[in-house]
Amino acid sequence: MTLLKDGFFDPEELKILPGVPSEERLKKGPVVVIECAQEIPCDPCESACHKRAIEIGDSIINLPKLNADLCSGCGLCIAACPGQAIFVVDMNYTETEATVQFPYEFLPRPKEGDIADGLNRAGEKVCDAKVLKVIIPKKFDRTAVITVSVPKEFGMEVRNIANRLKNE
Amino acid sequence: MKEVELAIVGAGPAGLSAAIEATKAGVQTVIFDENSKAGGQLFKQIHKFFGSKAHQAGIRGIDIGTNLLAEVEKSGAEVLLGAVVWGLFSDNRLCVTFDEGSRRRNVMYKAKKILLATGASENVLAFPGWTLAGVMGAGAIQTMVNVHRVLPGKRILMVGSGNVGLIVSYQLLQAGAKVAAIVEAMPKIGGYAVHASKVRRAGVPILTSHTIKEAAGKEKVEKATIVRLDDKFKQIKGTEQKIDVDVICLAVGLSPLAELAWIAGCKFADVPELGGYLPIHNEDMETTKAGIYVAGDLAGIEEASTAIEEGRLAGIAIAESLGYIDQAEAKEKKQVILSRSEQLREGPFGVSRKKAKEELMRRSLEQ
């Protein structure tokens, strides 16, 4: 398992998670991808979802189960996850691009319109990522949620960005 | 000599929670802490906590700390800071030194009940160069970065991939440092995968089956040599790598800070799953010495959320034993807390701690 050895999922590990939507559902538009693989005592995602698309159940160590048909991809669960393991992916943003929403707790925050390095789960640059939106309402408690657009083939790969200004 | 009903040593999550419950029930309570601010490690925990709503999940440790302090203030418990409890004598007498800047004042207290909530100390790792400036514990770094806002270095090597090592790595990134790598002697990452993934996707390599071999530098750390380990934890020759770092952070576990319990004559057990030697205690958190209770990391290294529950449990048990709560009411309250702490010990990460606690309870009955 690369998750336990290296700290990131390989695609096979990811597919079997109850919080990860099917490829068919991903094709239909915005949906959450819950990359939570260990039974740890934690359940804020369940109550963060007003549409009841995320179910933990009786024991708080259960993995979050996504009912992808109920999920609108609103993203309210992203900042609620203490493990920062929830993302929203829209594989239908344009003909060629997908969008990825992810939690971000670093300063300086990128600005809308910035072009940043799109990083995969291993922290490697895989493409350019255009920053579409940066939101940080009070309810998110200092966790910003950033939306970037990336080439479609990287929609299920990009999970972070490196702010180029910061690196210079 | 001053007389009090309950003396609590340590104003961290366990001590504060116990004070809240005991004082609410009517117990006259004094909390001593050697630091200049109450809250223990909570004010260094800037991340959102796990658990359920009942455990304050999703709330950052600093905010849980602020809420606890407000509750303590409302309760009327007396919090004495800069107060070092250095001795426990017969008849529940505590000797306390107050640091008053230019002078020190010693005061003897006599308490009907004592709760020790002294927390833990960090483990260290010895290797050539480990006494160089720049080799420091993860707790020290958290204090510098999150409390005093001082960055200890620019390029950090983290030793240990438990939750502390992973969380402190993340916080160092947030503070603007670069974490060159996290090394872990075990073949698997020790902490939660979600914490590991956070630092990994920020570009920090996590090297399992690796350890630090040596630190080098003239007056302070300039380089670290890391090396791969085989499946018997032996260093593999020829796999050494030199990396430029100015800080080596040790996050290799915690041990219960148990001196006062030793002095008091409490019986101990060696429980590796809970951090080593710790006082045997029962479901009420009472040690083998009647009237002396423990809670938090001293009663077994776990999360702050668990320390809060254990503190509440001890506070209620103490109020009951002093006659402020009747048995039926106490039983009901304790049951609610016990089921909450049991939840925190569920799953693969908690099961060994859960079993170890059950074994401790069994041993306390034998005493």
Image (cartoon, coloured by chain):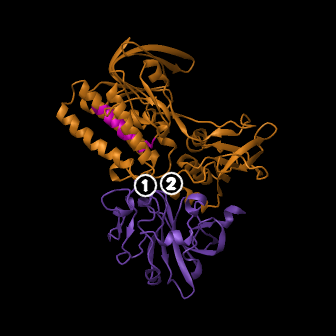
Q: What stretch is highlighted in magenta?
A: B302-316
Residue B280 got which mark?
none
Mark 2, residue position: B192
Q: Please, is residue B163 above or below residue B16 in the view?
A: below
Do pointers 2 and 1 mark residues of a single chain? Answer: no
Query: Residue at left 49%, top 73%?
Result: A15
Tell me the subunit letter for badge 1.
Answer: A
Q: Which amino acid does label 2 sit on?
A: Tyr
Colour purple, chain: A
Q: Please, is residue B351 above or below residue A53 in the view?
A: above
Front-lying residue, B231 or B110: B231
Q: For the C terminus of chain A, give its image quadrant.
A: bottom right
Residue B181 image position (x, y, % from top left): 67, 53
Residue A40 got which mark?
1
Horizontal side of B147 relative to B345 (left or right) equals right
Colour orange, chain: B
Q: Confirm or deny contact between disc 2 and disc 1 (CB under 8 A).
A: yes
Q: Can residue A107 be seen in this view?
A: no
Query: Residue at left 58%, top 50%?
Result: B161
Looking at the image, the residue that sits furthest to the right is: B218
Which of the 4 quarters of the picture holds residue A130?
A: bottom right
Query: Residue at left 44%, top 26%?
Result: B268
Magenta segment's dominant SS is helix
Looking at the image, the residue that sits furthest to the bottom is: A95
SS category of the residue bearing label 2: loop
Q: Please, is residue B150 above or below residue A105 in the view?
A: above
Residue B273 image position (x, y, % from top left): 48, 40
- Disc 2/disc 1 C-alpha distance (Å): 8 Å
Q: Which amino acid does label 1 sit on?
A: Ile
